[in-house]
Each structure stands twice: as structure tokens, then as C-alpha cells.
Image (cartoon, rainbow, N blue to C red):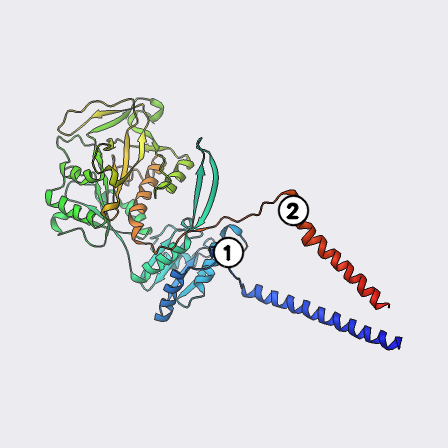
Amino acid sequence: MAKIRNSKNKIFTSFAWIIALLILTAAIIINVIVAKLDFNIDVSVQKLFSLSKTSSEYLDKLDSEGKKIEMYFLTDMDELKNDSQTRSLYRAMIEYSQHECIDLIDFDPNKNEEMLEKINSDNTYTLSPGDIILVYGDNKRHINGISMYNEKMTYNSSGEIVESEEFFAGENIITSNIQAVVDGYLPTVYFLEGHGEKTMKDNYDGISSLMKSKNYRTKQLNLSESEAVPDDGEIVVIAAPTSDILPNELEKLSDYLDKGGSISIMLSPNGGKFDYNNLQKLLNPFCLEIGYDYIRETDSSSHIAGDDTTILCNLAEQEESSKLYADMASLIESDFYTYMPKSRSVEIDGDNENLSSVETGILINTNSSAVSEPYGGTYDNDVIEDRELPVAVYSEDKNRNNAKVTLFGNAEFIDDDHIQDVSYMSSYYVYLSTVTWMADQNLDMGIGEKSATEDYLSVSKSTAQTLVLFFIALPVVIMIIGVGIWLRRRHS
């Protein structure tokens, strides 16, 4: 009888071990298969690793319409896969590629020059690792890789960073650009002519080429020959006019602003005995004023040697609510020198009745050692000293379809003679930031940013000890008891 019982125990024991080994083998095989398939379940509260409903529905629509978009990703996907800092971007790219309308082609730009030549044969774009090129038929769009994440910082009363949080903004940018390349959307930057301005062809070839690489088209515009600013006009640039605009041109530009247009004005001091009356009328609703002067620096350490009108300036900090905050904060932290060549002062009119309806700010100002000397205009102006003088300002009218205006006291700092000079790099980037601020407002599908900061669980020492006891010690004790019971029954 005992032999029969022992034989049965051996059979049951062997069967239990076989079942355990089968379960273990199955678990290993399933894990390997899942790993190979890169299968994930997004359990994050914000669905950080999944596309939003807006993106999914739009891509589903493109799938059903049989659209095909080539998405060239200038990074090997395997480099992102195991990097926690880029996990949200990696998962987004995987999700995009799972739609039939997206053909994802990832490659290392440092190793595959042939592919680079294919997507950028005319050198239109300045490309870097992490960038994305979208191609749909004859349409192309370039997405800068560094735009995928935004960092927001909290400061204490002393200006020190007390908290920093990173947000993934890539989905809104990528989906919006997919829509733009499919629709053939290409915003145009118009350079106004007819008033002695610096021209795109003769003076701004460099900045024009750069704008093209940022998905903007550039053209000249003569308003005296046009009924209005064309509908595709994203920005109108008025660069160093030597005469005022005409009343009918003022009306056309005002109508353009009423529709939410953007105007970038750069007014170098010219000494002309006239006033920009119509330009000033254009600026009045935005609470911005033109100065009739030129600025020189009295501190020799704050200007180029032998030239007291090419002066060292300061970048102005922005309110955190400002859309220019992140770009300006990044430039301030970079510690670039900020020089401006001979400039006039510009001002924000603090007494203007429209001040409460617009958002204004200073972008660049001088040191207090700079002096404003009267120059040009028909009014008798006084010398201004012992205070900082703004040389670049901006304004946005929320009640006018978010119409935007920037006013710079100089037009030379971004021309072809200065754009390669490292001394003007900071000022140049400020200008590019304003272009992005003005032009990108129509390229937005409203997909919110997602926090990319990893969550951590902070526990006390006693809580940690309890968790160790519960999750490690207790299972070990149970296992020991189980083995003991099994051995006892085995020999009973």
C-alpha cells in the first residue's frame, strides 16, 4: 500500500514539475514574441506613449483616402528605443508608422549621405540628426528635431530654478506638418518694396534661404500695384524704408492686420528730415513708437573698438505666459554676445489707451550707459541718457484676431553683410524667434503637450522596510513553508 502511495506521489510530483516547466517555457516564449513585436500597453494617465484622438482620426482619414506620406527620420530608431529621455518620441514614431498612410524611413544622416542627397538635393534645408522631412508628391516640409520637447521652469524670488519639467510637444508639431504637407500649405513672407527698402534679392538672400528651410516661401510685394496683401501672406516685412508708406498702403496693411496678419518692421536710422506718419498710425493701436535718433555707447567696454554705434545690448526676460518666453530664456542662458549695429530707439507707449488690450514686450535693450542722439525727423528731440533704451519690441492684439507686430530699430543685423558675423548671432536668433512666433499660429491642430518627466515614488525609511518585507521577505517565507510542507508530505 505504501509503495502504491509513493508511486502516486512521484507521478503527481513529476506531473507538477512538468506543468511548472511548461508554464515557465510558455511565459518565456510569450515574452520573447512580445519583445520582438515591440508590443506595449500605454497605462500612463496622459497617454504619453499613444497618439491622441485628433491625430488618430486624421491619420485614419488619410488611410481611407489612400494618401501616402514619406516620413524621413534622421535618426536610427534603435538609438531612441532604450533611451528614457526620448521614449515618448520613439513611441509616437512607432504609432505613426502603423498607419498605412505613413511610410517611415529612419536612417543615420552621418552614415547615409545618399539618403540625405535624395531628400535635400537642392540644399534647401539645414538638417541635423533628429530632424524629420515629410514628402507628399511635390510637397515637402522640414521639422526641426529640437522642437519636439519644451522645458518649463519654475523660479523662486531670487531668480533661481526650483523646478524643471519637460513636455513632449512633438505630436502636435508632426501631425500639423503632416496636414500642411498634404494640403500643400506654404506660408509666404512678403518683403515690402517701393519705399527705398532693403530688398530680399540684394540684401536678404541669406535670411530668405533660411526662411525657405523653415517652410516659408519668400516674395517681394509692391502694395501700390496690389489691391491687398495676398491671402497667403503670413508675414509682411518692412525693412529700412527711406520714405513713408502711402495712405492707401496704410489702409491695406490695416485691413491685413484686422484679419490677424503679422508685420515685421525694421527701421534703421537714416537722418531723413521727414516723419513716418503712416507707419506710426499703423503702430499706434499696438502701443509702439518710432524714435528719431541713433544710439551710441559711452562705455568703451560695451561697443566695438573704434565704433561707438555698434553696441553691446541685453536680451530682455519675458513673462512665463509669453509665447516668446522659452526661446528668449534659452538665448539668455546661452550667454551669446548681443550686438546691434547703428540703431534707433523704439518704445512701448505706456500712456496709449489700447495698452490694456494688447500684449507688449521688449526683446532687446541697451545698457544704461548708452545715449540717444537726435537724428532725423521733423521734431526737436532731446538727448536721452542714464536709462536702458529698447531697440526691439513686439506687440500682439488679442482683440484683432491675434494680429502681431515687431519693431526693430535696425535692419542691417540680419542682412547678408552681417548674418555670418558671430557678434550678431544672438540678435539674429531673436529675429528668427519672432518669425516663428508670428508665422506658426496657423499650423496648430490643438494637440496638447504631454509631460515627459518620469514619475518617482518617494517613501520614508520605515515605509521602504515595510515594502521590502511585504514584496520580498514574505514571498520567500511562504516559499520556504511550501517547500517544507511538500517535503514532509513527500516522506509521510
Classify residue 389 as left or right of residue 88: left
Instruction: Identify the residue at horizontal 41%, vertical 51% (top origin).
Output: 449
Q: Nearer the viewer, residue 60 or 275?
A: 60
Q: Is residue 209 left or right of residue 71?
A: left
Name the amino acid, label 1.
Ser
Q: Quadrant of residue 324?
A: top left
Residue 106 visible, this orientation:
no
Q: Where in the figure is residue 50, as x and y percent of width and height?
A: 46, 59
Viewer can see residue 453: yes
Using the image, determine if residue 32 lies above or below residue 15. above
Task: Name the side, left or right, on which 195 lies relative to 325.
Answer: left
Specify the amino acid type for callout 2: Ala
SS for dot 1 = loop
Check disc 2 and report the residue beneath it.
464
Q: Quadrant of residue 183?
A: bottom left
Give the number of the disc on residue 251.
Answer: none
Residue picked out by circle 1: 44
Q: Residues within 10 Å of mark 2 (few under 14, many from 20)?
A: few
Taking the spot 30% from the left edge, 27% from the top edge, the residue there is: 388
- Quadrant for the N terminus, please: bottom right
Residue 125 at x, y percent in the picture? 35, 52
Categorize mark 1 by other alpha carbons within 10 Å: few (<14), some (14-19), many (20+). Answer: few
Q: Position of residue 305 (x, y in %)?
A: 33, 25
- The quadrant the C terminus occupies is bottom right
Is 467 placed left or right of 244 in the picture?
right
Q: Answer with mark 2 or mark 1, whichever residue precedes in sequence.
A: 1
Out of 235 and 156, give the one closest to the viewer. Answer: 156
228 over 288 or under it: above or below = below
Residue 259 at what x, y percent from top left?
Answer: 21, 50
Check disc 2 and report its element: helix, strand or loop. Answer: helix
